[in-house]
Amino acid sequence: MKKIITLSLCCVLMFPALLAQNKYDDLLRVKRDSLDYGFYNVVDLKLHNGRFMKNSESLDDIMDNPYFAVDVRIGFQTTGVKQIWDQLYGFPVYGVGFYSVYFEGGELGDPEAVYMFMRAPIFRGKRLTWNWELAVGLSYGFYKYDPNENPDQQVIGSNHNVYFNAATGLSYELSKRFDITLDFDLTHFSNGSTRTPNLGVNLAGFALGGRYSFNPVKNLTKKVDSEYDPPFRPEFVYRKIEKYHRHSEIILFGSMGGKTTTTQIYDGPTYFISSFSADYAWAYHHVGMVGAGIDLFYESALRDYPTKIENASFSDLTYSGWHISHYLRMYRLTLVTQLGFYIGDKVSHKGPYYLQVGGSYLITENFFARIALKTRNGAVADFIEWGLGYQIPFAYAKKDRN
């Protein structure tokens, strides 16, 4: 029995090595001048410094002071060999990262976040590149509002929150391996009003960093062919992009969720909410669509705010709006941004307009799942929409669709 267990363990331990060897053998069979030889990775280290975008007077001792943060991430540099989307976005970098921020004072805590990111160029020169970046993840380590233990912290009501970062900046290639980077970025922490208070934490600042490029196949190649020296950075593959057949789509989306109200801070009930939207969208390019549509909302929280309604009817808890939208497509993912305006004054306490920002994933050719954040009074979180949708393309030949 012991021999069987020992033999099994040996097989388990050897199996990854055998797979790896086969992979390396496959790589070595590739022509030495192949543009797809290896794995082009980058490691970034950033040091952040900036100020709060102040939204509360309760934390003057923290928000009147600067913040400091450290950001470490590892990414994969695309080459365009396998996906035409890489070329459409200027050969972006995808990866994961870790963010840790320090606030003066102890009421907010010192939160950290893990996230996924994408970086793509706006302009790419021989050594200087101007980039944009988006990162989304989950944070932890906040000290939430507590009327007994943390009463001055009236900004955020949960320990765990969504992390969002948008940045633009420059990178300069110092050598084959090293870059220096300088970014301006905006950071947002929020729980989407699943717990109150939820004014959110908003940061604006600069980040100075360094980037290290490496190809892990390099050392493995030396063992087999000591004369070959794989590059650290890829040569991008440019292919002819076929003309896009512009078309129209009807996009239907329904969602459900929950929220708390500002009148029942900390331990109030979670109210059911749902929404339905219908969009007419025009696909003008491989990566983009613009559109307009209507929204219908059902929000049981209206029983509590802005006025108490004892026996609220369905119509008392519903309201509507219309919006303009933009869809930024990439593979099966879509970044959805909408600017909406309420119809009527039933929810005038929410302000005259709202934003909806989210991401959807195309499960089949037409069926998708979406998560989106709806706001009130500008950019204050109202609730999170979790839902499914269906898109109906028309006004073009299906065989021409890209």
Image (cartoon, rainbow, N blue to C red):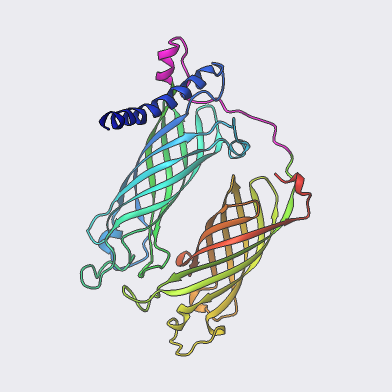
State which quarter of the image contains the N terminus: top left
Residue 366 visible in image: yes
| Residue drawn 41% across the image and 68% down it | 193
Extent of the magenta region: 218-242
Q: Quadrant of residue 177?
A: top left
Depth order, front residue of 347/144: 144
Q: Quadrant of residue 98?
A: top left
Q: Is residue 29 above or below residue 236?
A: above
Q: Main secondary structure of the magenta part?
A: loop
In this picture, residue 132 sits left or right of residue 288:
left
Residue farthest to the bottom, as pictured: 311
State which quarter of the image contains the C terminus: top right
How far from the left and from the top, in percent, is residue 371? Answer: 51, 59
How far from the left and from the top, in percent, is residue 337? Answer: 56, 58
Residue 175 visible in image: no
Depth order, front residue of 106/249: 249
How far from the left and from the top, in percent, is residue 142? Answer: 29, 58
In this picture, residue 291 sits left or right of residue 153:
right
In this picture, residue 109 sits left or right of residue 137:
left
| Residue drawn 55% across the image and 83% down it | 314
| Residue drawn 40% across the image and 67% down it | 194
Depth order, front residue of 64/316: 316
